[in-house]
């Protein structure tokens, strides 16, 4: 036997929940310093020399960090004419580092470095005359670092590609220097607080099986978990649509939520979501409007815990099934009757 549950629309603004993710890396600024040996390109006519680097950086994510570094080296010139003279080489670069282990997940971390910067080479007293050249320079390499509290020790090998803009005695268009170094970074500021996972909450014990309160229910009647007949109608009067609208109004939320509680209490129920309109407008327009109203209620039910598998539709019936007169006996408009017809129903299917 088919039973009908009247369900009149609602306008519900559903609040979106935001999940706050705990930060899993150290985002403090740090300073870095390193020293090593610069194996000068053979085309430079200079001997290899020690070099130093100083800079600062910041971790930008679980695997990435960014550094701004200054480098300095003073190699001795190796050609006979300029023997005994030194060149000054210095520059800055902006480098990105990719860490293969998530930052903070391990004490040992291999990484690669890539960057772009500016290099200046100058000689003020060589036999070939004074010169100064400025070039863009690229750097690429990699290394291994070990973290000990706020200190990190590094060992690294890089290649720096430095263009030649007129160094006397050389025709090479660019130089490739190899840099081998060891260094240390120091984190600045206090260590960030680590997110503490909340203690898991034990689920409540299952409720005891309900006592059968209605032992003499006739055959064919739908019963709930307590053994009693399911109410054939949920009264949702008070939830109405505005004229020519398909949005659910806020004042009907409480009433519609009562219907949701009944559906959750009796999970065996299957219902059809059906929308209706008053008589104003064409048949085709009212058919579309009733479908939109049924869809609004359908979406509200499913977003509030009602399994879509229990819902049939949404279906629209236009103005074909009024429950109140749309006009008075003298033919004048009946606003109250039309308001009742602007509705959505839940029709029990089992």
Image (cartoon, rainbow, N blue to C red):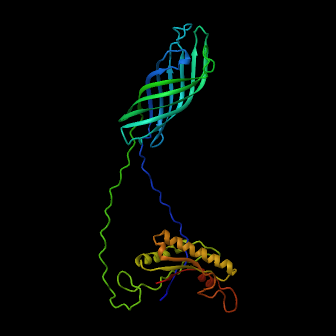
Closer-to-camera residue (47/267)? 47
Instruction: Answer above or below: position of 47 versus 188.
Output: above
Closer-to-camera residue (175/318)? 175
| Residue 190 at x, y percent in the picture | 39, 38
Instruction: Answer above or below: position of 273 versus 205.
Output: below
| Residue 313 at x, y percent in the picture | 54, 77
Closer-to-camera residue (170/311)? 170
Residue drawn where x is 35% and y is 82% of the image: 226
Instruction: Answer above or below: position of 228 versus 72.
Output: below
| Residue 269 at x, y percent in the picture | 44, 80
Q: In which quarter of the image is residue 329?
A: bottom right
Residue drawn where x is 51% and y is 23% of the image: 177
Please state if 21 lies on the left or on the right of 286 as rendered. Answer: left
Please state if 186 lies on the left or on the right of 245 as rendered. Answer: left
Tally the numbered discs.
0
| Residue 330 at x, y percent in the picture | 69, 92
Please state if 305 lies on the left or on the right of 289 as rendered. Answer: left
């Amino acid at each position: 036997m088919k039973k009908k549950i009247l369900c009149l629309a609602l306008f519900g603004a559903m609040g979106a929940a935001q999940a706050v993710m705990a930060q899993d890396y150290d985002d403090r600024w740090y300073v870095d310093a390193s020293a090593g040996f610069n194996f000068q390109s053979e085309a430079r006519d200079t001997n290899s020399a020690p070099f130093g680097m100083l800079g600062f950086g910041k971790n930008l994510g679980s695997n990435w960090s960014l550094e701004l570094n200054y480098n300095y080296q003073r190699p001795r010139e190796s050609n006979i004419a300029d023997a005994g003279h030194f060149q000054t080489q210095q520059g800055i670069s902006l480098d990105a580092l990719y860490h293969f282990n998530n930052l903070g997940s391990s004490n040992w971390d291999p990484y690669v470095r890539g960057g772009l910067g500016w290099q200046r080479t100058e000689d003020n007293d060589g036999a070939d005359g004074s010169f100064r050249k400025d070039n863009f320079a690229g750097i690429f390499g990699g290394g291994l670092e070990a973290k000990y509290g706020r200190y990190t020790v590094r060992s690294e090998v890089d290649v720096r590609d430095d263009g030649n803009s007129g160094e006397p005695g050389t025709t090479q268009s660019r130089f490739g220097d190899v840099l081998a170094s060891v260094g240390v970074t120091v984190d600045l500021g206090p260590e960030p607080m680590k997110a503490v996972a909340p203690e898991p909450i034990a689920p409540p014990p299952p409720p005891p099986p309900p006592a059968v309160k209605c032992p003499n229910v006739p055959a064919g009647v739908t019963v709930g978990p307590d053994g009693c007949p399911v109410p054939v109608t949920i009264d949702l009067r008070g939830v109405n649509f505005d004229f020519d609208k398909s949005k659910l109004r806020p004042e009907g939320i409480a009433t519609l939520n009562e219907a949701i509680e009944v559906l959750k209490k009796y999970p065996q129920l299957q219902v059809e979501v059906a929308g209706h309109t008053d008589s104003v407008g064409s048949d085709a327009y009212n058919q579309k409007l009733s479908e939109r109203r049924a869809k609004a209620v359908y979406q509200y039910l499913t977003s509030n815990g009602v399994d879509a598998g229990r819902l049939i539709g949404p279906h629209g019936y236009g103005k074909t099934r009024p429950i109140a007169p749309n006009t008075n006996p003298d033919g004048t408009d009946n606003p109250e009757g039309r308001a009742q017809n602007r509705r959505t129903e839940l029709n029990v299917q089992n």
